Amino acid sequence: MNYLDVANSGFMFILCLIPVGVIVLQAVRFMIMAWKQGIEIGMDKNKLKKCITTSATISVIPALSLVSLMIAMSPNLGKFFPWLRLSNIGAGGYEPMAAGIGLEAAGFTEYSACTLGGFVVIMMVMNIGMSLAPVNCLLTLKGYDKALKKAKKTSRFLLIGTSAAFAAVVARLNVPYFTDFSKLLPFVAAVTGAVFMFICIKLKNRYPVIGDFALSIAIVAGVIVCCLVA
């Protein structure tokens, strides 16, 4: 059996629909609570409505980057699992990387050779890997934040060190795509995204709203250019 038959089945759709539905209901509940809280503290209803429309507007276009990523992942992971991952706590940089790790862990180098068992391994890696983040935050974030604030007051090195560590993580995730010329499309996507991100940063000073959509613009541009090249 081809694993994509299962990945695109109605059963997989139902399995993914349940947690996505919970996420949507949770978001709606939070919006209702926020509206009631705003009324209780005396906020004007017109301002609240404007806040809702503004938030909705600036949320749609940035979300296009995740939609484009979901479409890009669908041929290899099916229509529904990428939808679940990116509706939950998925991230553009994490999902493809975790899927690749799962593929290698299952003993495959190409998705075309992947089996149903391999697909299960990929799903486990992607889900369990990201689930560790909120658990870790729940257990350690408060203490870590307290210790870090105290340490920053006594050691200026930490101000530089934490920023350097973050820059190193970003470099580790991105630099290989700029240096591996054997894989054309990843290289083209990386360069295109970088160019458009640079342009957006330059335009942000004149048009601040572009800053909210810079990532979406860069990703969509990378996808379009890759489609043209391919």
Image (tube, grey):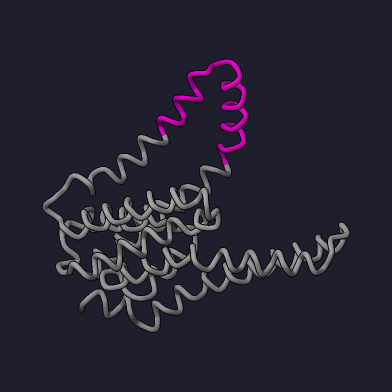
Residue 152: image x %, image y %? 57, 22
Q: Which residues are magenta?
A: 139-165
Could you say where residue 92 lies in the image, as x and y percent from the top left?
39, 57
Q: Quadrant of residue 164?
A: top left
Tell me which residue sits at (30%, 78%) in the image: 6
Q: Residue furthest bottom?
A: 10
Q: Could you tell me which residue is drawn at 29 percent across and 68 percent down?
A: 224
The residue shown at (44%, 25%) is 161
Q: In the picture shown, does residue 115 fall above or below 124?
A: below
Dominant secondary structure (helix, strand or loop) of the stretch shown in magenta = helix
- Locate the N terminus and report the quarter of the image it occupies: bottom left
Work out which quarter of the rendered image holds the C terminus and state it. bottom left
Left or right: 55 in relation to 190 = right
Q: Residue at 43% of width from left, 56% of height from top?
A: 215
Query: Residue 83: x, y in percent?
Result: 42, 70
Up-down: is 169 above or below 14? above
Image quadrant where residue 55 sits: bottom right
